[in-house]
Image (tube, rainbow, N blue to C red):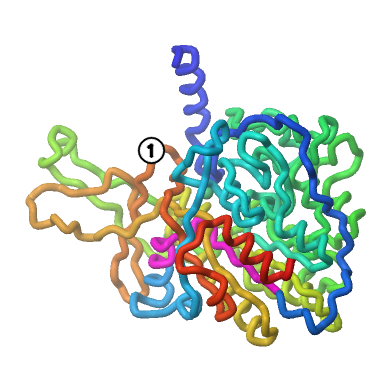
Amino acid sequence: MTWGRVARWTVGALALGSVVAAAQDVAAPPQVRTEASAVEPTDAGVDGGIDAADASGNVILIIGDGMDDQQITMARNYLVGVRGKLVIDSMPVRGAVQVLTVTDDDPGKPVFVADSANSGTAMATGVVTSRGRIATSAGKDEDLPTIVELARKAGLRTGIVATSSVADATPASFMAHINYRFCQSPAAMVQVERKGVVIGDCSQDLKKNGGLGSIAEQVAASGVDVLLGGGGEHFAPNVEGGDHSVRRAAEEAGYQVVTTGAALVAAPTDKKLLGLFSPDTMPVRLRGEGGRVGEKPERSALNYLHWALGTVDQPAPMKCEDNPEFAGVPTLKQMGEAALRHLSAPGDDTPFFLMIESASIDKQAHKRNPCGSIGELQQLDEVVRSALDFADAHPGTLVIVTSDHGSGAHIIPDRSLFATFPVPIYTPGHLVRVTTPEGATMAVNYATNDFPLEEHTGVQVPIFANELGREVIAPVIAQPDLFGIVKAHLGL
Ligand SMILES: [Zn+2]
């Protein structure tokens, strides 16, 4: 690295000093498109001739972003107590998923920690790719057909629900093709910046260069029957080369656009539905007391002189509290149930594929906010209940719950295992000591880096299913296997 590069990165680092607000992965952008892509048609007819007798192949895939076993344990401890059971704990089929990622310049070489773009792509297309990519192949940048596109082509109904922007990495992986996840809107296609630092570029995916345009433009043209989440700001800019907004383009493509919970409930089910309930990521349910997140233990001057001397004060314990910004926004359960109503309208027994994502388990882990993650895992657990109830009433509905990758939180001892030694023992990372409802203290540690945003981790992730999953989900699968499992159940 030259001194010039050091200087640039130093300036960039200073500009990033207050980056905490944007809890998103800044994955290195993959290489540019190298050859023309074979785009799966996305305008196939949706009303195929599938009769009611065959209507037993619904799939509801629920993804907890960053929901590893640490997150599930944290949420269980806090929400129902250590001896309690979450809804996912009642699911009869349980296994592990190996998360696979490759480098972009050598797709034969593994990378051991994923982001939501490549892991979403693995589930949506069955292909292992590199970080940052949305349904495109590593290195070659070829568009990979998604399960949503295949379902639509076969005349099935489709739905996407997320608490992130509907153009964010996980939902986008099911309905768009682009080399870099942060190209969400037509205004963010060239030299995409975060806090003054260029983090990527999607010039080769501009329509004028033969591409499909930004993620929001692709979402508006996706034909997915019901799309609910955040991300309104990505639909506000004009379409590339046009004089109307992406939102307008969605309306012209037949979408009714709603922005409030009341409008969501009142929306007719005979029209395609696009719900945009916040500018970007939807507000989360819980937060730390007074907005507190992970804090570093405070070391005395003497401790700086020698690790065994002086004192180290841990952050004070705190409770989780309601996030005031959450008031009034639809819950994930409300969105999931609205999508199920939409996809199973009386008189229409066409099978459907529905992906539901609780996105901010991960985004709150980036911010070192266990309360935020716990509230979003609670939202996931509630919508799992709705999905299981739906499956009980609609036999043949396969319900799968899984995660895309691990996140940075770890439950550590609140009193060190080595506390009998007369020295200060503390985490070099950030700590939150959560007071649980039974009055105990759960210490959650974040120590993957010294950046304002915590990393992901490379652990295998859990998978759960209802009884229908027993014959088709092996105890240990690779993440891309999910594509085949879903495809087979949909009858594709
Ligand atoms: Zn993340």
In the picture, measured across the screen, residue 368 lies left or right of residue 130, that is: left
In percent of the image, x 60 and y 33: which residue is there?
A: 29
* Percent coordinates x, y for residue 147 in the rendering: 71, 59
Q: Which residue is mark 1?
A: 450
Q: Nearer the viewer, residue 246 or 355?
A: 355
Residue at 57%, 72% in the rendered image: 472
Inspect the image, locate mark 1, and give the three-letter code of the amino acid beneath it: Asp
Location of residue 171 in the rendering, given as x and y in whole percent from the top left corner: 67, 55
Would you say 256 lies left or right of 328 here?
Answer: right
Figure quadrant of the C terminus: bottom right
Q: Is residue 412 above or below residue 204?
A: below
Residue stretch in magenta? 58-74
- Disc 1 beta carbon < 8 A from ligand 1? no
Magenta span contains residue 59: yes
Along the viewing direction, whichever of 44 and 225 lies nearer the viewer:
44
Residue placed furthest toward the top? 3
Image position of 230 (left or right of 409): right
| Residue 9 painted magenta | no
Q: Secondary structure at mark 1?
A: loop
